[in-house]
């Protein structure tokens, strides 16, 4: 991929051409980052602040869990374990932070 330093435009990824499993994994990654932000555990890069929004965090975590169930059927067992651990980590942190 070209860098901005060599004067060329970086290549744009056409996500519509990606495999469904790859897209689901990508969405899990994006939603995971959002869930951590909504739990107030990551800084929002736009505002440079943390903010808790439990409704959005719960929605992100629920979607991650749903996609994990679908994806774990087609990925190697070690990846499926990693995904299940991710969901559990998010759920535990959600319950802990909401109870504070």
Image: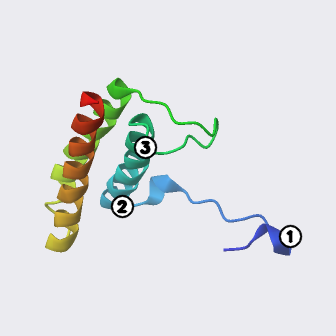
Q: Earlier in the sequence, mark 1 or mark 2?
A: 1
Q: CA distance from mark 3 to mark 2?
A: 26 Å
Q: Earlier in the sequence, mark 1 or mark 3?
A: 1
Tell me the mark number nearer the camera, choosing from 3 and 2. 3
Q: Is residue 57 left or right of residue 87?
A: right
**Which label is found at residue 22?**
2
**Which label is found at residue 71?**
none
Q: Is residue 12 left or right of residue 27?
A: right
Q: Nearer the viewer, residue 86 or 94?
A: 94
Q: CA distance from mark 1 to mark 3?
A: 37 Å
Q: Earlier in the sequence, mark 3 or mark 2?
A: 2
Q: Which residue position is annotated with label 3?
A: 41
Q: Nearer the viewer, residue 68 or 40?
A: 40
Which quadrant holds residue 92?
top left
Q: Residue furthest front?
A: 100
Quadrant placement of the N terminus: bottom right
Residue at the image point whose x is 75% and y is 71% from the top: 3
Quadrant placement of the C terminus: top left
Residue 63 picture location, percent across and down: 27, 39
Q: Under tag 3, what secondary structure?
A: loop
Q: CA distance from mark 1 to mark 2?
A: 30 Å
Residue at the image point whose x is 20% and y is 58% from the top: 85
**Which label is found at residue 7?**
1
């Amino acid at each position: 991929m070209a860098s901005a330093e060599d004067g060329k435009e970086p290549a744009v990824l056409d996500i519509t051409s990606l495999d469904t499993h790859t897209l689901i994994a990508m969405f899990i990654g994006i939603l995971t980052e959002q869930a951590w932000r909504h739990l107030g555990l990551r800084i929002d890069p736009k505002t440079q602040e943390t903010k808790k929004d439990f409704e959005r965090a719960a929605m992100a975590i629920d979607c991650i869990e749903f996609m994990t169930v679908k994806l774990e059927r087609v990925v190697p067992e070690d990846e499926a374990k990693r995904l299940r651990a991710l969901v559990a980590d998010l759920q535990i942190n959600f319950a802990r932070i909401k109870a504070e």
